[in-house]
Amino acid sequence: MKTVFADTLYWVAIFKPDDPWTKPAKEAKASLGNVLLLTTDEVLTEFLTTLSKGGKSLRSTAVKAVRAILDSPNIRVLPQSRDSFLRGLELYKQRPDKEYSFTDCISMNAMKSESVSKVLTNDHHFAQESFTVLITRQNDTL
């Protein structure tokens, strides 16, 4: 089965009501057919942080979403480790001219180590590292 990386934007778009990226994210995922989604504990941490100020209902939705992600047979979540942290720190250090987030650096390393080239995100930083960004809106440019 083909594997695609799911970045924070994808999870937010899928689970946050009225998110402007919901439709493009769902369309991008649907266009892939049957795939295994790969993500990381760090991406899920960023997802929870993003939704943390959304009030009681959204926080509850976020917790349920993460539990469902962790339990899904169609999603593989790579655990955070000291090694992933240090490798992410090294990539972060190597790209002083970029504005990559630390989580993005960890995600990019995970994608490379798992030989995954496509990512459900709109983040052009992934394209800068030669990954294929799958979520776009008409008239968006990378």
Image (spheres, rainbow, N blue to C red):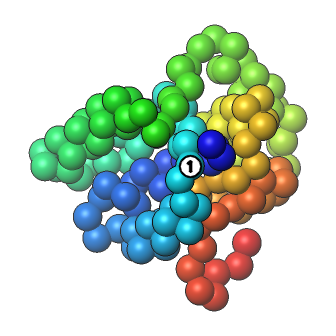
Nearest the eye: 10 or 106:
10
Q: Is residue 122 above or below residue 73?
A: below
Residue 10: give x, y in percent of width and height. Answer: 48, 55
Q: Is residue 126 visible?
A: no
Determine the residue positioned at 31% across, 48% down: 51
Residue 89: give x, y in percent of width and height. Answer: 73, 26
Q: Is residue 39 above or below residue 86?
A: below
Residue 49: give x, y in percent of width and height. Answer: 38, 40
- The answer to which image quadrant residue 16 occupies is bottom left
Q: Quick check: 120 left or right of 72?
A: right
Which image quadrant: the C terminus? Answer: bottom right
Q: Which residue is mark 1?
A: 35
Q: Is residue 136 above or below residue 120?
A: below
Q: Residue furthest left?
A: 56
Q: Amino acid at mark 1?
A: Val
Q: Residue furthest top?
A: 82
- The answer to which image quadrant residue 130 occupies is bottom right
Mark 1 burial class by Cα count in 10 Å: few <14, some 14-19, many 20+: some
Which image quadrant: the N terminus? Answer: top right
Q: Residue furthest bottom?
A: 139
Q: Is residue 71 visible?
A: yes
Nearest the eye: 43 or 74:
74
Q: Quick check: 134 left or right of 68?
A: right
Determine the residue positioned at 71% across, 38% down: 111
Q: Quick check: 19 left or right of 29?
A: left
Q: Secondary structure at mark 1?
A: loop
Determine the residue positioned at 49% across, 66% down: 30
Q: Quick check: 24 left or right of 123?
A: left
Determine the residue positioned at 50% across, 48% down: 8
